Image (cartoon, coloured by chain):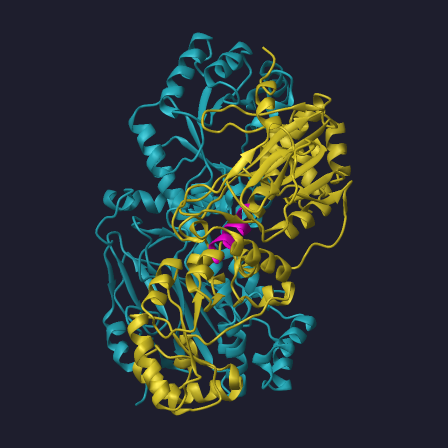
Chain colours: A cyan, B yellow
Amino acid sequence: MNGLLTDLYELTMSAGYFEAGISNQVATFELSIRRLPDRRNFVVAAGLPQVVEYLLGFRFASEEIDYLRSLPQFARASASFFERLHDLRFAGDLFAVPEGTPLFAGEPVLNVRAPIIEAQIPETYLLATIGFQTLIATKAARVAQAAGGRAVVEFGTRRAHTPEAGVLAGRAAYIGGCIGTSNTLTGFRAGIPVYGTAAHSWVLAFPSELEAQRRLQELLGPNTVYLIDTYDTVEGARIAASLGRPLWGVRLDSGDLIEFSRAVRRILDDAGLPDAKIMASGDLNEYKIREIVAAGAPIDAFGVGAELATSADAPALGVIYKLVEIDGRYTAKLSPGKVTLPGAKQIYRFPDHDLVALAQENVPTPGAEPLLRPVIFHGRLLEPLPDAKTARARCAGSLERLPEAHRSLESAAPYPVEYSPGIGALIESARPHA
Amino acid sequence: MNGLLTDLYELTMSAGYFEAGISNQVATFELSIRRLPDRRNFVVAAGLPQVVEYLLGFRFASEEIDYLRSLPQFARASASFFERLHDLRFAGDLFAVPEGTPLFAGEPVLNVRAPIIEAQIPETYLLATIGFQTLIATKAARVAQAAGGRAVVEFGTRRAHTPEAGVLAGRAAYIGGCIGTSNTLTGFRAGIPVYGTAAHSWVLAFPSELEAQRRLQELLGPNTVYLIDTYDTVEGARIAASLGRPLWGVRLDSGDLIEFSRAVRRILDDAGLPDAKIMASGDLNEYKIREIVAAGAPIDAFGVGAELATSADAPALGVIYKLVEIDGRYTAKLSPGKVTLPGAKQIYRFPDHDLVALAQENVPTPGAEPLLRPVIFHGRLLEPLPDAKTARARCAGSLERLPEAHRSLESAAPYPVEYSPGIGALIESARPHA
């Protein structure tokens, strides 16, 4: 039961809508990107499967309703409100952009259209789900961009905000461009490649490093990746090299990665192992990787953890969930610095710009792709969602078509997002009655 | 089943320990604070209930084991290893500091002592669980400190890294010093006070702001908190004031909070509502709150969201999980900049310093509190854990006793943490055989 997994005010407002007799008025809420995080020129949409799972499974358990009854905030709510909660299911509509789609500031990620009581309560869950996974997919796209074709593996579950967040971070990072994740459950659930090496405890658990690495090779064969910095990286490389084939390669996890990679490369080459690879990890991010790549360091793959699984330099995304229509009326908030645009919208993606228009507005869109697609209609999933692999391909293809400035790690001028005449005309109509 | 919720390498190492015949050697792993995040002078330990729940529920489902069998990394693992996984339970020991305890760099949060296969696999889960919740409790302590006695409510689930992380963030924030959370499920599960106001959508859903606020008052009575910035804050305050009692107060969510709070205070006072309170929210953190408090702004309570639920300025905690003993042998890694200290440890908290000693070391500790306590012994929980309220009181009491410099928002000289002679003597013994 997931009904209580929301902010209390969603539930008190729902009670209020019910008591005011408007809880069945059809509302459209829009979840959109208010602003891009610093240094980001786009975000990569992710998280839709969890949104769908939540909406389709939405309900309250009896003991959850009993809990609400016990709260002072519900002291004046009527018995029939709690009966309504008991029977509440999501029977509305969801429109969303496919996972892996790059989006820009001001663009909607999804719309929920349903009786307002059904559309209001999901706000908190939807914001957290889309916001987090979109952040991670976006960060992964940056890291992969910096790696310039070298492989990046997501290694960050241990730093994720709960282990369960790590499961979803691994999936989102894959969509954004990682080749896989260290999270085994992500592999199991989402069919994403999983990778791993060994921890320092492996080396420590045996009486000598040589014995530890020999045992690793026995177990992993051509998938063996020796972690060589437990005691001394250069000596560790010599021990690894002494074991010859089979192996995939070695991992560096501390010290000056550029310098060590060169020394280790020589040791591997001198041992007749030019095909043995070098992976680097340890507090990496897109900037450090760019530096390593620019230095021409002989590093073949990167493991990125904390920075990726927490989107450390931008750990919260400015996504909002706003009422844009109710009962046929357009709505918008006018708070200073936080104005929203009324009306359910569509994004038309042209080769060189986006056009945001009202969903039902008749605008010329030859050659444009409408990004928001129907996902749930009258409470039913229309068709299975694309899998993570499809989303990853969509992301890669879309980013390739972006101008180079927008793919860079630095801020560029905003990507051209235009608004239709219909939207402008609506803003005034959204002001309240005097 | 939670067995796969870990990094792949924990599982390949487990296979390796098994194949090498050492998987039943008793190991002690220590989860400790490698370093404090920037500007933090302490962290507040949190997350123990989830650690206990994970360890006690640890197991693999058959289909999870089938998945592992299908991976290339397990191609050489024996059938008896998978049988071992199938029967694997956590039957070891857990020692941990109670939730709500402030800790400093280098100090252990918990020790796991078990056959190495049982102690290795939990690494990923334990790091993510303790790291995240400790970050949030720590951030909450800072925010509460800045608020100087004014109430702080955790509002951040919508920005948390998954909605489920929000549930735990609400609990951790309460331990750190918040008076409650907006997350309803946190209230239900952890018995923590829940709070809420109303969203802009509430005001937008009615034809006029006056009608919306009148309906809110009808529903919430003395718990009514009007959100007054949907269209115009000053006008919103007048509308709220015109409705008179009952009410709790109003919430400001945009614009210059100091300036608006003064204007709104006057409006409420002039309407004969001097007891009506003002809550502020909107991208707040400890620094902005300190500024607001220093300006003497008439704000009675703060709602803090994204910054708190993501620990935005320090979204990842440097916690490590290291093998410190195996089969009676002490172990330590010597990687550059990442040296660990061997041996299972105890922290003795004296009034003015901490002493970290080996667990079995005989050091004089009159007047000191040993912080690590037995929690699970031979796979059984020794006694129910203290609840969140107890942890919150422990945190508040402990922080009160800290020197003022260490309670400040800025970096102070490190709190005095001393190491026993026994630990120093061990470091050399931990070097491997030649």
- A416 on left or right of B338: left
Residue at image position (58%, 59%) is: B392
Count of marks overlaid on the render: 0
| Residue B284, image x, y percentages | 38, 62
- SS majority, magenta: helix
Residue B283 can be seen in this image: no
Residue B330 can be seen in this image: yes
Question: Which of these two is toward me, A112 or B96?
Answer: B96
| Residue B72, image x, y percentages | 60, 28
| Residue A199, image x, y percentages | 56, 29
| Residue A356, image x, y percentages | 29, 64
- A5 on left or right of B16: left
Question: Which of these two is toward me, B73 or A286?
Answer: A286
Instruction: Tell which residue pokes out farthest to the left in this image.
Output: A413
Q: Is residue B416 above or below residue B251?
A: above
Residue at image position (47%, 85%) is: B247
Q: Is residue A230 above or below residue B37?
A: above
Quadrant in the picture for the C terminus of chain A: bottom left
Q: Which residues are magenta?
A: B131-140
- B85 on left or right of B177: right
Question: Which of these two is toward me, B50 or B159?
Answer: B50
Question: Which of these two is toward me, B121 or A217?
Answer: B121
Residue at image position (45%, 69%) is: B150
Q: Is residue A88 above or below residue B244?
A: above
Task: Say if the magenta span includes residue B135.
Answer: yes
Task: Say if the magenta span includes residue A244.
Answer: no
Q: Is residue A173 above or below residue B265?
A: above
